[in-house]
Image (tube, coloured by chain):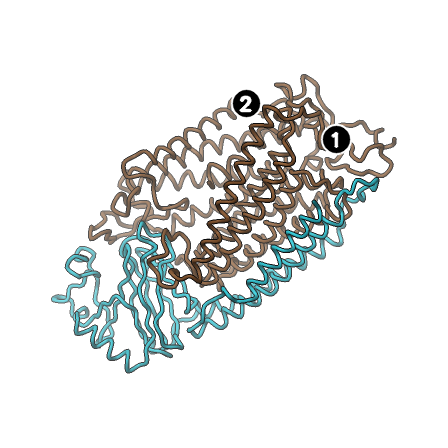
Chain colours: A brown, B cyan
Amino acid sequence: MVFFVLTTVPQSGFGNFALPIQIGAEDMAFPRLNMLSFWTTFVGMAVLLSTFFISDGPPLSGWTSYPPLSAIGKATGPGEGLGQTLWIVSIAIFCVGSLLGSLNFIATTLDLRARGLSLMRLPLTCWAWFITAVLMLLSFAVLFAAGVLLLLDRVGGTSFFIPAGLVVNDQMVNHAGGSPLLWQHLFWFFGHPEVYVAILPGMGITSHVISTFSRKPIFGYKAMVYAMCSIGFLGFMVWGHHMFVSGMSPYSAFAFSVLTMAIAVPSAIKTFNWIGTMIGGKLRLATPMLFAIGFVSLFITGGLSGIFLGQPALDLTLHDSYFVIAHFHMVMGVAAIFGMFAGTYFWFPKATGRMMNEALGKAHFWLTFVGAYGIFMPMHYLGLEGHPRRFSALTGVDFLNSPHLIHLHEFMTVSAFVTAGAQLIFLYNLVYSWLRGPKASVNPWEATTLEWTVPSPPPFDNFAGRHPVIHRYPYEFSVPGAASDYIMQDAPEETKAK
Amino acid sequence: MGLAIAVVVALITLISTGIFLSHHWWLPHAISTIAPAIDRQFTLTFVSTGIIFVIAQLALAYAVWRFRDGGDTRRAAYSHGNTRWEVVWTTAAAILFIGLNLIGYQIWASVHFTGPEPGAMQVEVWGEQFNWYFRYPGPDNRFGPTHPEKMNDGIGNFLGLDRSHDADSKDDIVTATLAVPVNREVELVLRSKDVTHSFFVRELRLKQDLVPGLEIPIHFMATETGRYEIVCSQLCGLGHYKMRAYFEVMSQPDFDKWLETQAAAQ
């Protein structure tokens, strides 16, 4: 989920389509590199899925794959043999695909912008994809290296992550000298920026959609850009907050927790600015806007629980509990997915030339929004009660195996089924609208950016040989004195005077 | 539609906050000297973030309802933002978030920066897939060395002690339950035989990973007798969910008697 959905869809999925059109380019800078990135990622996915078809099954060490559990082999559990090896290979391949893609995004954003499109005139979506690409470039390189080391520990007889004197199942392990914490440092040095890789594109889409559907310029464009830049920058300095109780030096917790609190500040700025954009606007509550509003609500909820978890003293009880699951699912799971839905409903007419059904879209939104809260809100209560995460059954611990907590699990399970069922509405809408939806005009949402100046769907080279010139900032809505309530980015200067 | 969103967002906000406030599900009864401070810090954080949560969600709900497009000819306000407000809420957020952190840091320091009080009782805590073992040093107050090559659960030598050669090991007491006397400072030394585990007793508000290759000390004082549970909080394999041991806080005489019985069973 983290690698093959949250990393790929918001960035590569939407970015490869919308970034070149939004900046007035006929394609990404390196189309072949782009294809190589896609197929590399595809192979990575195939290797990962293959673990379901081998005799001892997929690995059980989770997406963090902490050694020694993941480093020793079959002895530590089913799936820790070939399955774990294939997992590492798959993730290493995935890293290569992501690195290729991120280079392409950076080059495209820097080099292929249309005349007049200065960086401070970029749509916030482009800023988000650009910063995400930089994060991917710097973090996936580290994960790749860590993956290679872990693979060597498994198959090459090295001991980067395996200390001396281990006894698994009464069998001595023939390794010495490694440190399990080294993996955690490397992994989270990647893992924390990865969180922002998942959420930044959603922030970009949300900003874009909220401004467009509020018919109002985004509140504090520059503050939004600087907030994303500082989130990206600080994102590399907070990995230790995943490790407060890991056994690393307790003194370093101070630096990591202050920086973690600091990163909450730009996140708060973004939230204020989204609401600030809506205040005084004229909100068109079409489906993309509903999902953007849902994103803001979920982001507030998930962001605030981070204020608890950023404090090492509270992690003495909350770390690795359901409270953590609630936090990151709200903020980087469901919120990021709401960003994807907002993007899908928003750009579907441009990509396919047909409109999606609004009634089905709204039904999908309501069930998913209420359902997501139904799944993840009760997890906070479980976490307070001390319910550890990653438990496959409740029967091993007395305090978990009680109606007091089981009722919450039952409620969450029902919510999960309802939410999953609601996605069938989305899939039906997607397929039906693609085949039978009403034809989309060039600019059905009356938006201002360049993708809405080309036909729906766009021609192969986006602009059919035309070279657009940009005259203004991306969110000129409701300009006093203008004929309509939006002015396209490429409209000539005199448009404003009319 | 605007009204519907406002109502649903407001309801979700108020109901979930109400459930928190009802304390129906809440931090369990606390039994350590450090726990009240942690609970106070939790409550402080809960109140301040809770107020922001309710205000922000209700502001969102209000904005959606109040500024929805009603089909009239009104135009949206033309504004690119307000620098003064940006500065105000940036500063307010920074002071609140970092301030909370600084207040809470005292607690972290008292758990990790200062050692146990002198005369603390030492116990070793060992994790293995999917069992806990506890070692008391016995009358000599010294732990004997452990020999990985001698570790053998099959014959009951869980920690690889060599009682016939190592004098310090002779009186070591290995148990499956962690018992401690009430109101006595205890220092645990956490060690793992195989993979990373995590020691967690929710009533103590104490959690710390057991990392293979490291000996990690933590300390606490339990203030109420009773029987509690130690659960593993770090994914350690297929049986992670059942890696549990009992944690018993006893009066000093009960504890002495218990330890004697355990010693006799070695």
Q: Position of residue A239 (x, y in %)?
A: 48, 51
> Foreground residue, A76 or A99?
A76
Q: Is residue B144 left or right of residue A332?
A: left
Q: Residues within 10 Å of mark 2 (few under 14, many from 20)?
A: few
Q: Position of residue B119 (x, y in %)?
A: 33, 78
Q: In the image, what residue occupies the spot 61% across and 24% down? A: A436
Q: Residues within 10 Å of mark 1 (few under 14, many from 20)?
A: many
Q: Is residue A474 above or below residue B97?
A: above
> Foreground residue, A285 or A467?
A285
Residue A61 badge: none
Among the 4 quarters of the image, the one containing residue A364: top right
Q: Is residue B17 above or below residue B70?
A: below
Q: Is residue A56 above or below residue A66?
A: above
Of callouts 1 and 2, the N-terminal one: 2
- What subunit carries mark 1? A
Q: Is residue B46 left or right of residue A38?
A: right
Which type of secondary structure does the marked residue at label 2 adopt? Answer: helix
Residue A489 badge: 1
> Foreground residue, A493 or B252?
B252
Point out the image quarter for the C terminus of chain B.
bottom left
Q: Position of residue B175 (x, y in %)?
A: 24, 67
Label 2: which residue?
A31
Q: Is residue A365 left or right of residue A390?
A: right
- What subunit carries mark 2? A
Tag 2: residue type?
Pro
Among the 4 quarters of the image, the one containing residue A204: top right
User: Contact, CB < 8 Å: mark 1 with mark 2?
Assistant: no
